[in-house]
Image: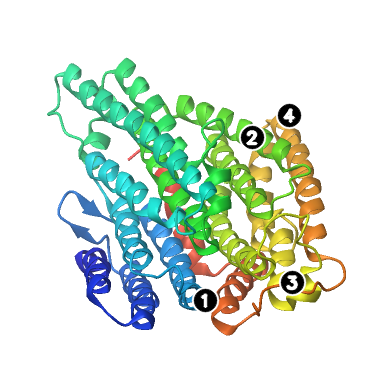
Amino acid sequence: MLLFLILFPLAGAGTSLFLPWYQGRSWLLPLCGGLHLFLTCLLLNSPAPQLGPWIGLDALSRLVLIVTSLLYFGCAIYAVGYLNLRRDRGNKIIVPCLLIFLVAMTLAISARHLGLLWMAVEATTISSAPLIYYNRNRLSIEATWKYLLLCSVGIGLAMLGMLFIAYAALVSGAMSVSLQFDSLLSGATILSRPWLHAGFVFLLVGFGTKMGLAPLHSWKPDAYGEAPGMVGALLAGGLTSVAFLAILRAVQLMTAAGDGDMARQALLGMGLLSMAVAAIFMVRQPDIKRLLAYSSVEHMGILAIGVGIGGLATFGAMLHLVNNALTKGCLFLAAGNIQRAYDSKKLSRVHGAIATLPISGSVFLAGFLAVTGSPPFGPFMSEFTILRGIFSSGQVWIGLLVLFLLGVVFIGMGATALTATQGEPVHLETDFKDSFLLVISPITFLLIILMLGVYLPEPLQSALRDATSLLEVQP
């Protein structure tokens, strides 16, 4: 079943290249996405699915897999309506690239070998670059090249980190050199510490570039700003979760070696820096999609802070991973509708969105409240849990700093979001209107994060506890 989960979207991508029917090609996306989500749900109930020593699922990868699969399915439904409006651009490239992107993310999530993980993360870069260039204008090609160059440099540094870890095993002389993750965990205590530390730093910088932690985030505003809304949702909610999982693998290895404190301090520092940088650039931000890009930087920082603090905050970070992915899906899809209707994403032209587009405008405003940690939405509960973990650990000044930065983000983001959504209706030059396929996914994501704010199902609580235990307890 795990092998099928990886291979059938690849078969769908191949089919889409030869399918002559435009609408049928688009419907391959929700078909493959729905089957992927169905199989993922089945795998959650099976004990430790393994496909040899290189591919398998543990508690961490199961959590990321279900979130990514759910987000992808929602974006795939949205894509059918979106591509029907963009027949001038065609879908013979974007459909196979979206399906290969799903394959690459699934392979990265299930990888139990650092080399395979590296290859899969690099495949996500290659398959997503044409998605960013979909609008084929000067700004989109600039964003695509910036994304390719910076992420390729980052993934190159991650490769050096893996080589250093392999050399740490070689220097120790007490274990065979292997990048198989379970073998590394079992022999982590005898790895050469200097080389292990160097490897962790390069992995953090390399995958941190892909995740978008400051100061490695500079590709995000351009890529998210110029890509279609559904692509922005997949990048901000799916790809960043995959990159975060890769960093968590490095944290697991450091914890198993007895150096978890060093790894957590590094994550804590980068997390605080990410929140500070995002807060600065979100104040008076005139572009609604670049605003969401900086919001992504902020929330990557919150995830890093949660794991950096440890304990209860780590549980909050695992919950926040779920909330962030679905909230970003809601916001980017609603923002894509607004941009399509106004033919702009700038505040100079976008205002009165609720009166003009009642559904998309209202969802965008509600998404703003959710992403800034307002009750009763899910991000409020996860951020509150992280803050409880910070204060209960005795790090009061860090907690106060996080609260201050959250306040700055709320004010800065609120100025843009309220300006875009409030006001009198606008006479649109386009004939765009909200339709079922374009609003059902963001509404569903919004309802889910609302439910997670008032009720946390027991299966999800169990999954979060299991994922947290992998980071808190030495194997």
Answer yes or no: do the residues labelled 3 and 4 have beta carbons within 8 Å?
A: no
Residue bearing mark 1: 85
The residue sitting at 16% across, 49% down in the picture is: 53
Foreground tag (2 vs 4): 4
Front-most of residues 49 and 103:
103
The residue sitting at 68% across, 63% down in the picture is: 367
Residue type at the position of mark 1: Leu
Quote the CA–CA distance across marks 3 and 1.
Answer: 22 Å
Quote the CA–CA distance across marks 1 and 4.
Answer: 50 Å
Residue bearing mark 2: 393
Quote the CA–CA distance across marks 3 and 4.
Answer: 36 Å
Residue bearing mark 4: 397
Residue bearing mark 3: 362
Residue 126 in view (yes/no): yes
Q: Secondary structure at mark 2?
A: loop
The earlier-in-sequence mark between 2 and 1 is 1
Answer yes or no: do the residues labelled 2 and 4 have beta carbons within 8 Å?
A: no
Q: Secondary structure at mark 3?
A: helix
From this view, report whether residue 23 is shown above or below residue 57. below
The earlier-in-sequence mark between 1 and 4 is 1
Question: For this view, does 106 lie left or right of residue 275?
Answer: left
Quote the CA–CA distance across marks 2 and 1.
Answer: 52 Å
The earlier-in-sequence mark between 2 and 3 is 3
Q: Position of residue 341 (x, y in %)?
A: 66, 71
> In which quarter of the view is residue 220 placed?
top right
Front-most of residues 317 and 76:
76
Residue 251 in view (yes/no): no
Foreground tag (3 vs 1): 1
